[in-house]
Image (cartoon, rainbow, N blue to C red):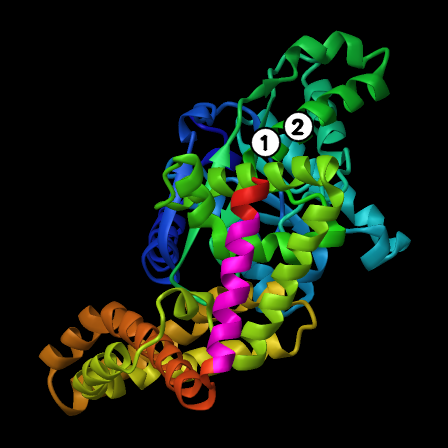
């Protein structure tokens, strides 16, 4: 029989299925789990250690990888202070607070003992615990400084069992096609599990040495699993080149570049090549980065995207797209209820935060926990009582499709407006300058890389 801490309540399973559907089918366009076979079997004491870039979205992505376990997640304590209901919900799905000196203050650090005691016991019971050693999320695609608290907790758990329980550390990494909006792609990749058992004896005499060794191994694996742009002085230029010239580089190197896992491999190869060329030809790479930033400024000034420059914008394609938008307009107006209000309410919470990485957290959590149940169930009963229960059931059945229609129509309309705006306001000289800038960067990439 499983220990109580490892048992999964029936209501939790139902609630998780609901959240997984919203996460995998509505919030994201496609989710990928790479090397999931590396996850130790259920009831194996495991600590999953990951990079951290997207607040609540990071642990949710890992949570929905599991079907047979209820993991615990150690995350920043300020998330639990948002609202009492949020606090209760986060704990119910396995999240536990980690208090930090730079944020909650020295007095709050003693609260970590309660969290660590709960997680140590969960590990010894054969549970899974996830931790983020960066102790906070990044706002860019790079790996921050690692705290070693996860290693200390693992060995203290082993010590409670007189070093009889074998505990594993599993490195992992999250990657996103885009951090903002919905219907992006998400990827979680798992590394090779590291057993702590071979280090038990040495840890008892040289704990710091063992801690440094294991931390270095974990960090090395995570670095290899993710896109880690270390040249922060040129981050904006590198990230822009990666996003806008990835396909060109992939074609040049004969690399597939369709799915997010494939794109991640291309991005890593491209960034590594840029770093290598920078060491060999610093002046030439500096010129390329400046060209990229200038081109980025041109696009922003003219409200144009690179794909429009590459495709040689024409009135014909945009007029044809407008016709399609007109045909779909009646369906879109129906789809605005209640999706427009759900989007605006979710965004209103994001506007209050200086950190843009909170957007996904608020959009998913607030909609999943409050707005979707309230709006959709209310509409279902109002339509059923005052009209037809058949129409009410049809409304619920079509709700996911209408949500996607509302999002994609608005996205397409915005792009179409930008296209017409560019076609009407930009003269031939402006288009020529953009095209020249784009081709200059392509030539530089072909030459240097």
Write down the residue under mark 2: 220
Write down the residue under mark 1: 224
Q: Badge 1, how many Cα within 10 Å: few under 14, some, many 20+?
A: few
The answer to the question of whether label 2 and label 1 lie on touching residues, with beta carbons closer than 8 A, is yes
Residue plotted at (37% across, 75% down): 411
Is residue 426 positioned above or below 272 on the image?
below
Camera-side residue of 366 and 111:
366
Camera-side residue of 170 and 374:
170
Camera-side residue of 105 and 183:
183
What x and y, as percent, mark residue 272? 61, 37
Decide whether residue 431 is among the magenta residues. yes
Residue plotted at (39% across, 80% down): 419
What x and y, as percent, mark residue 191? 53, 27
Q: Can residue 201 be seen in this view?
A: yes
Q: Is mark 2 on a helix, strand or loop?
A: helix
Q: Quadrant of residue 214?
A: top right
Span shown in magenta: 429-444
Decide whether residue 442 is among the magenta residues. yes
Secondary structure, magenta segment, majority class: helix
Q: What element carries label 1?
A: helix
Q: In which quarter of the image is residue 401?
A: bottom left
In this picture, residue 380 sits left or right of residue 296: left
What x and y, as percent, mark residue 100? 80, 51
Q: Is residue 94 visible?
A: no
């Amino acid at each position: 029989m499983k220990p109580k801490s490892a048992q999964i309540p029936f209501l939790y399973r139902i609630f998780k299925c609901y959240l997984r559907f919203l996460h995998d089918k509505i919030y994201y366009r496609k989710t990928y789990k790479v090397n999931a076979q590396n996850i130790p079997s259920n009831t194996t004491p495991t600590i999953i250690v990951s990079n951290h870039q997207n607040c609540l979205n990071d642990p949710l992505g890992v949570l929905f990888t599991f079907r047979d376990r209820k993991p615990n997640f150690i995350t920043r304590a300020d998330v639990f202070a948002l609202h009492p209901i949020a606090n209760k919900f986060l704990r119910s799905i396995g999240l536990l607070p980690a208090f930090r000196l730079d944020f909650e203050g020295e007095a709050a650090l003693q609260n970590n003992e309660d969290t660590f005691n709960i997680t140590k016991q969960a590990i010894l019971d054969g549970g899974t615990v996830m931790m983020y050693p960066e102790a906070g999320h990044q706002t860019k695609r790079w790996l921050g400084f690692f705290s070693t608290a996860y290693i200390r907790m693992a060995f203290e758990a082993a010590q409670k069992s007189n070093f009889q329980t074998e505990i594993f550390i599993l490195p992992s990494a999250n990657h996103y096609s885009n951090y903002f909006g919905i219907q992006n792609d998400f990827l979680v990749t798992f590394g090779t599990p590291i057993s702590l058992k071979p280090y038990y004896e040495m840890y008892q005499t040289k704990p710091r040495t063992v801690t440094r060794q294991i931390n270095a191994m974990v960090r090395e694996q995570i670095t290899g699993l993710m896109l880690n742009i270390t040249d922060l002085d040129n981050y904006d230029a590198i990230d822009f080149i990666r996003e806008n010239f990835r396909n060109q580089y992939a074609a040049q190197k004969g690399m597939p570049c369709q799915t997010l896992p494939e794109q991640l491999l291309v991005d890593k190869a491209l960034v590594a090549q840029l770093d290598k060329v920078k060491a060999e030809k610093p002046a030439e790479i500096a010129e390329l980065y400046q060209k990229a930033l200038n081109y980025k400024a041109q696009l922003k000034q003219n409200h144009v995207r690179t794909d429009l420059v590459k495709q040689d914008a024409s009135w014909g394609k945009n007029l044809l797209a407008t016709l399609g938008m007109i045909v779909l307009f009646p369906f879109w107006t129906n789809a605005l209820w209640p999706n427009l209000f759900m989007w605006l309410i979710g965004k209103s919470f994001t506007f209050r935060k200086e950190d843009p990485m909170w957007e996904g957290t608020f959009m998913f959590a607030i909609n999943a926990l409050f707005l979707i149940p309230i709006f959709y169930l209310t509409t279902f009963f109002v339509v059923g009582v005052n009209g037809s229960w058949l129409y009410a059931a049809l409304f619920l059945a079509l709700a996911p499709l209408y949500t996607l229609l509302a999002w994609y129509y608005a996205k397409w309309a915005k792009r179409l407006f930008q296209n017409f705006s560019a076609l009407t306001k930009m003269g031939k000289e402006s288009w020529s300058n953009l095209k020249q800038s784009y081709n200059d960067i392509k030539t530089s990439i072909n030459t240097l890389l």
